[in-house]
Image (cartoon, grey):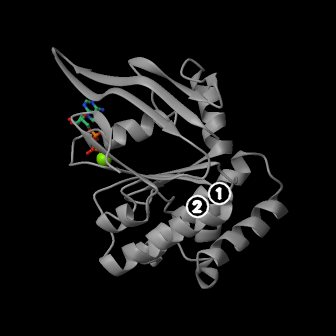
Amino acid sequence: MRMKTTDLTRIYRLGPSEITAVNKVNLEITEAMFMAIVGPSGSGKSTLLHLIGLNDYPTFGKICIDDADVSLLSSSEHRKIRLLRMGFVFQTFNLLPTLSALENVELPMALAGKSSKEQTEKALRLLEAVGLSNRLVHRPKELSMGEMQRVAIARALANDPEMIIADEPTGELDSKTAKEIIALLFEINRKKKAIVVVATHDEKIVDVADRIYLIEDGGLRLQS
Ligand SMILES: Nc1ncnc2c1ncn2[C@@H]1O[C@H](COP(=O)(O)OP(=O)(O)O)[C@@H](O)[C@H]1O
Ligand SMILES: [Mg+2]
């Protein structure tokens, strides 16, 4: 996947006040890139990730995937692209509390219409790859935070995404666990050639990124 944004802008209107959370962002994301977006709290990181993850609509500007403008597609078409081509990892994991680790990883494949045999085989493989073969039947509350994030990463990989979008994925983790999670994202990026876009203020992620962008007041600029 290649993604290009042109003057991507998101303005939140709350009553009489307007907040320009993302301001004219021009970004090119190419195959297999590991990209970090750093910036202080409130600078627009999550808003930008929601836009490029087709989870929100820009107020102005556009997003192209492989040269096709996707900004005006319907939300159900966006949902399909998200499900089949993207994977999301959040700071607070967003696992379904009533489902086991295995079931959480199977879910995106169920939504994509995969057979239950395929769902289970793939989920087992993914959980093994993230080092959780011994936690299959555990529910989220029976897992450590690092383990929850591994499940979330396995879930994000379920439909072989071309792009993984991670919003402060190590924000809730201690520094040792954070390092392991970053190493895992890096390994996925290098092995599966999946694009990884991480919003963070974690220096350790910045160390492994191919490209680092700084966002301030919604404006993005290349840092290195
Ligand atoms: N749903 C919303 N409605 C109104 N303002 C919002 C909303 N979400 C975020 N904002 C504002 O937009 C700005 C950017 O927020 P956000 O993208 O969450 O930043 P970050 O992820 O870098 O902390 C902040 O000023 C925030 O208060
Ligand atoms: Mg945020």
Q: Is residue 197 above or below residue 116?
A: above
The percent position of residue 139, horizontal first and vertical second, equals 52, 72
Foreground residue among 98 and 220: 220
Q: Disc 1 and disc 2: Cα gap in Å?
A: 5 Å
Is there any visible trace of residue 150 in the rendered image? yes
Q: Nearer the viewer, residue 192 or 12?
A: 192
- The residue tagged 1 is 193
- Residue type at mark 2: give it: Asn
Task: Name the residue located 56 percent from the left edge and 35 percent from the top edge.
Answer: 3
At numbered mark 1, what does the secondary structure look like: helix, strand or loop?
Answer: loop
Element at label 2:
helix
Residue found at the very far bottom of the displayed protein? 134
What is the x, y in percent for residue 116? Answer: 81, 59
**Residue position for label 2:** 189
Query: In screen coordinates, is 6 left or right of 16?
Result: right
Judging depth in this view, the residue of 202 and 106 nearest the camera is 202
Assess whether mark 2 and mark 1 are in contact (beta carbons under 8 angstroms). yes
Q: Residues within 10 Å of mark 2 (few under 14, many from 20)?
A: many
Q: Position of residue 89 (x, y in %)?
A: 48, 55
Q: Amino acid at mark 1?
A: Lys
